[in-house]
Image (cartoon, helix red, strand yellow):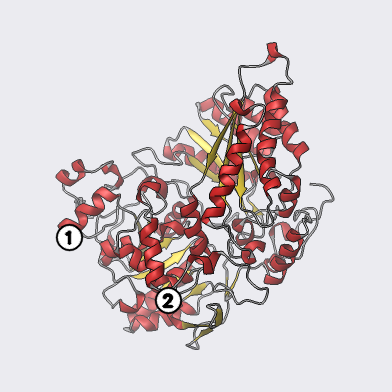
Amino acid sequence: MSTRKLALSDEILLSVEKPARYIGNEINMVKKDPAAVDVRFCMCFPDVYEIGMSHLGIQILYDMFNQWDDVYCERVYSPWVDLDRIMREKHIPLFALETQDPIKNFDFLGITLQYEMCYTNILQILDLSGIPLKASERTMEDPFVIGGGPCSYNPEPIADFFDMFYIGEGETQYRRMMDEYKEWKKSGGDRIAFLKRAAQIPGIYVPMFYEASYHEDGTLASFEPIVPEAPRTVMKEVEMDMEHTYYPEKPLVPYIKVTQDRVVLEIQRGCIRGCRFCQAGVLYRPIRPRKLEFLKERAIKMLESTGHEEITLSSLSSSDYKELPELVYWLIDECSKNGINIALPSLRIDAFSLDVMSKVQDVRKSSLTFAPEAGSQRMRNVINKGLTEENILNGAMDAFRGGWTRVKLYFMLGLPGETYDDIEEIAILSDKIAREYYTIPKEERKGKVNIVTSTSIFVPKPFTPFQWARMNSQQEAVEKRNFLLGKVKSQLNAKSIKYNCHDADVSVLEGVFARGDRRLNDVILQAYQEGCIYDAWTEYFKYDVWQKSFADHHLTMDFYNDRERSEDELFPWDFIDCGVTKSFLLREYHRAKEAVVTPNCRQQCAGCGAARFGGGVCTEKRENVV
């Protein structure tokens, strides 16, 4: 391979913040000769390097693609605003980190969609790469742009910008896609010919092969395929074999500090809990644990190949991993020999968790995290949280006795059916936890107790029981926040409680994009052209530009957020089958309105539909107890 020449001059690199974001060559970076492969694939995370490098999904796909001799997978992240400006001024095309070659020279650009507020950054990536923003305008000279990740479960607000979306887990169908691509290249067909091949691969959705029509009231009237190759329903892809699948032994190690600067061990996929606000809990059903021996072997290999001094476990609900005690105690033994830290995920606070935490954390410095999500028991039942006040107070008390004095509490404001009494209960529960601390005799206490109560604005998401619910307006969110702040200040232990809240403007837009339709593509395009980028970063968020763009396209945010949807409404994402049936989600919505709890998957099967995948928790022997 020829000597690697950086795409940016030293002069430019020295003039931008954190130049290491753009030079590649990190530890475990894969080097191949681009001329010796059939397919060049660039993997993109449309946010700043430090966030993108912390994403496990890209590490898994990067490892998988690069194990194939005929494919070279490289990476690109969103240039930060300082470099963005320079690249536009100097007409420097966006490049991949590995070879520093322009993205436009690749066969595929794969963009992971983790968060709705990154949508303008997708356009930034395409724009700086010199790739036409709309798929319909691309030619044989352009890469195929493919989207994946949780936001691809409602791809409609950004459908125009993508040639295709991969719905589900990447391990299953990408090999077939590479082979189809190679066959197509030999055949000399045009772009449409390849997209027609791709549309026949399970899990692949090609937006230009579908047409939407609308009722006069703005709701979706129909959504139909317009070519025979496009399926009426796209079924999500699920990797059921968690043992013999790809998982990196040599993950990439950045030169600069990133958000997750550690080895990440994915212990299972999916969740048994069935919280009604949680999209991931539905999308990743059924729960599929990895075997203990596989995890031990990977942990050792990844620590050896990276030099990381910290390891963490990844899953939606780690406490539900049946072999968690064995894994964690084994890790403690392994890591203490080598001076490696264990960063624990959020666990249910019980005797085991506290024992483990006291072994792996500096109790004086660390805080314990609880996510009750709602203040009152009624609301916890509405959202199916499966957590009682007694659980919370007992867990906090055990922690205080174990020497912890800092507690973080996470709640949501604006949940369906919430009253001001329910909101006040957030302040009361925060105070009750502080009171528990002060029941410990003074001589046994370790200083004051610190409680940090944080709220975010609830955003209804597709493929959850709350996909029918209305979302609170910005004004309602602000009023509720102010009300709660007043209630926190009036508590007996107000001095011990700190209240943090999330920005309402951003949440409103997130809500629109989460459940939006194709008409939003032009709104997003205009907002981008008028300077919107890095919308997830408060300092760059331009709410007024977004409002203008909606008005210019005769659309309102209220249409998407400020109404409860009728039970028979056709949703923009209804053509996707995520494995969980719409009838199950509707049944759960009705149970939420009645504040009825649905048991978790291990206690009792609720018939969600995921049993069709034939594995995971669905085939486990049922237990009568958690």
Picture quarter containing residue 553? bottom left
Instruction: Say if mark 2 contacts mark 1, CB within 8 Å.
Output: no
Q: Which label is found at residue 366?
A: none
- Residue 72 image point, x, y percent: 35, 60
Where residue 188 appears, x then y in whole percent? Answer: 31, 83
Q: Residues within 10 Å of mark 2 (few under 14, many from 20)?
A: some
Q: Residue at 55%, 51% (x, y): give it.
A: 477
Spatial CA distance of label 2 from label 1 is 34 Å
Pick the residue in front: 301 or 465. Answer: 465
In the rendered image, the quadrant that contains the N terminus is: bottom left
Q: Earlier in the sequence, mark 2 or mark 1?
A: 1
Q: Residue at x 30, y 76 (%)?
A: 138
Residue 85 in view: yes
Q: Nearer the viewer, residue 428 or 533?
A: 428
Looking at the image, residue 530 sits to the left or right of residue 176; the answer is left
Give the quarter of the image for residue 377.
top right
Residue 609 in view of the camera = no
Label annotation for residue 91? 1
Q: Secondary structure at mark 2?
A: helix
Question: For this rendering, which residue is in front, 76 or 114?
Answer: 114
> Disc 2 residue type?
Glu
Task: From the top left corner, tell me how far across and down residue 401 is, in percent.
Answer: 70, 22
Residue at image x 65%, y 39%?
347
**What residue sits right under mark 2 in the picture?**
180
Mark 1 nearby-residue class (10 Å; few <14, some 14–19, many ≥20)? few
Location of residue 242 in the rendering, given as x and y in whole percent from the top left corner = 60, 55
**Front one among 359 and 507:** 507
Q: Is residue 522 above or below residue 324?
A: below
Circle 1: residue type: His
The answer to whether 82 appears left or right of 473 in the picture is left
Q: Looking at this view, name the residue that lies furthest to the right.
A: 624
